[in-house]
Image (tube, coloured by chain):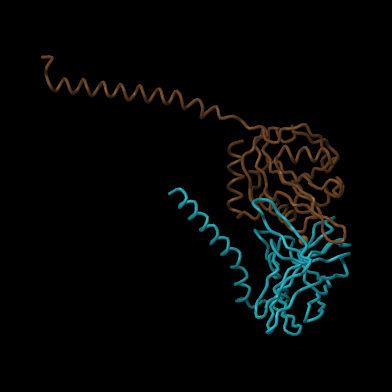
Chain colours: A cyan, B brown
């Protein structure tokens, strides 16, 4: 009985969280003023690869690392793979995965990159897959953008300027977890 | 007269009542003192001497100063969890307003070799002026990490760099340093605030 109540409360929080989280975004789409959020609608096409909702998180002073996120869709009939990343502002950019193991956050470099199966979409998002910018020379500032190059096994290389969202942003529209 | 059946059942009823009271009182006497004398866990007990981002000394006593605390173990070369948690701490403190005046907040580095007091200061004070960065000699950080049962493990990355696997929860600590629970990474704001208010109410 206690378990059921706890589960119900957890479910309620989850629903509330999702609602709070996604509601502002939905409103933004309905609204007339789309200024300043064009980036999230930009879709970059490189052969069969489509990159959407790319963003990096703003960094705190003295933080030499930053994370970049996006969704990648392989619209082709053949599997592809994201095998490399680079950025002018960072000494190094690596493809990483992080995950909570209990209450311990673990992060690893993916030496084989990220598989992009034909017809599927892979999401790089906070808490999971990301491009890790290391040795960054100056902070990533919200509202600016970071020049990034990505290399795919088959589709080749693409360069673009990745918009910088808030420090705790979960999307390119600058919406952050909680309020700020 | 003595054999009056009404009186007999009344007497029996009274005896039962006395019996129930006696057993109940006995049980209460056994159980209640234990409840009220719940042991105060000295969490984070250990002999460590660290330094805060202004160069002031930090010891076990810092976390048992008479004020409750939020304590997080992180590092500046942390791409996501640490900045996010710092921002969330700032958000909670802002939401609490004067209610949270008595609350201390600490960001203890698990990467003292790279995190100097100066580096930590700019980092932790960017989102809020309420969080104190803590660093120190590696051996002293090792002591606090084990005293707090925190997981912190150096993991090699490509190109000779490294990262730290680390406990991502925020510790809720009572005014005498007693462990009062944790806030999980990315816990819903309402839940987190509820836990902090609970900590303040108990303090
Ligand atoms: Cu990473």
Residue at 59% over, 46% down:
B195
Residue at 47% over, 50% down:
A3
| Residue toward you, B185 or A154 | A154
Q: Is residue B1 above or below residue A121?
A: above
For this orientation, the residue located farthest to the top is B1
Residue A175, quarter of the rendered image: bottom right
| Residue toward you, A34 or B143 | B143
Residue at 78% over, 46% down:
B110
* Rendered location of residue A54, percent (x, y): 73, 72
In the rendered view of the protein, which quadrant contains the C terminus of chain A?
bottom right
Residue at 78% over, 55% down:
B78
Q: Is residue B47 visible?
A: yes
Please state the quadrant of the image where ligand 1 appears. Answer: bottom right
Q: How many marks?
A: 0
* Rendered location of residue B100, percent (x, y): 66, 43
Q: Is residue B171 above or below residue B88?
A: above
Q: Is residue B124 visible?
A: no
Q: Is residue A148 left or right of residue B40?
A: right
* Rendered location of residue A31, percent (x, y): 62, 76
| Residue toward you, A7 or A118 | A118
Q: Is residue A101 left or right of residue B48?
A: left
Q: Is residue A171 above or below residue B80?
A: below
Q: Is residue B140 left or right of residue A24?
A: right
| Residue toward you, B200 or B42 | B42
Q: Is residue B43 above or below residue B111?
A: above
* Rendered location of residue A71, percent (x, y): 69, 73
């Amino acid at each position: 009985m206690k378990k059921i109540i706890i589960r119900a409360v957890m479910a309620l929080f989850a629903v509330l969280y999702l609602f709070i989280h996604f509601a502002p975004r939905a409103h933004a789409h309905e609204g007339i003023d789309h200024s300043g959020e064009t980036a999230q609608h930009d879709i970059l096409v490189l052969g069969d690869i489509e990159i959407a909702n790319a963003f990096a998180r703003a960094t705190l002073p003295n933080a030499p690392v930053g994370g970049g996120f996006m969704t990648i869709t392989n619209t082709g009939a053949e599997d592809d793979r994201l095998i490399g990343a680079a950025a002018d502002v960072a000494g190094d950019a690596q493809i990483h995965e992080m995950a909570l193991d209990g209450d311990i956050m673990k992060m690893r470099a993916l030496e084989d990159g990220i598989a992009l199966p034909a017809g599927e979409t892979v999401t790089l998002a906070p808490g999971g897959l990301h491009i890790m910018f290391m040795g960054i020379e100056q902070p990533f500032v919200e509202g600016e953008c970071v020049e990034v190059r990505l290399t795919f096994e088959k589709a080749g290389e693409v360069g673009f300027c990745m918009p910088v969202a808030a420090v705790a942003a979960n999307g390119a529209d600058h919406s952050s977890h909680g309020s700020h | 007269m003595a054999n009056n059946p009404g009186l007999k059942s009344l007497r029996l009823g009274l005896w039962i009542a006395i019996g129930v009271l006696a057993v109940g009182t006995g049980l209460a006497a056994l159980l209640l003192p234990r409840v009220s004398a719940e042991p105060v866990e000295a969490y984070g007990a250990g002999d460590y001497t660290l330094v805060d981002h202004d160069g002031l000394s930090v010891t076990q006593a810092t976390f048992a100063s008479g004020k409750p605390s939020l304590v997080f173990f992180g590092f500046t070369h942390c791409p996501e969890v640490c900045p996010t948690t710092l921002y969330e701490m700032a958000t909670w403190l802002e939401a609490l307003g004067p209610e949270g005046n008595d609350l201390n907040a600490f960001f203890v580095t698990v990467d003292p070799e790279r995190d100097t007091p100066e580096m930590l200061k700019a980092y932790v004070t960017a989102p809020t002026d309420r969080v104190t960065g803590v660093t120190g000699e590696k051996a002293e950080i090792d002591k606090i990490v084990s005293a707090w049962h925190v997981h912190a493990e150096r993991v090699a990355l490509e190109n000779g760099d490294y990262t730290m696997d680390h406990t991502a929860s925020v510790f809720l600590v009572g005014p005498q340093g007693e462990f009062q629970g944790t806030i999980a990474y990315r816990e819903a704001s309402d839940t987190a605030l509820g836990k902090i208010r609970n900590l303040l109410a108990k303090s």
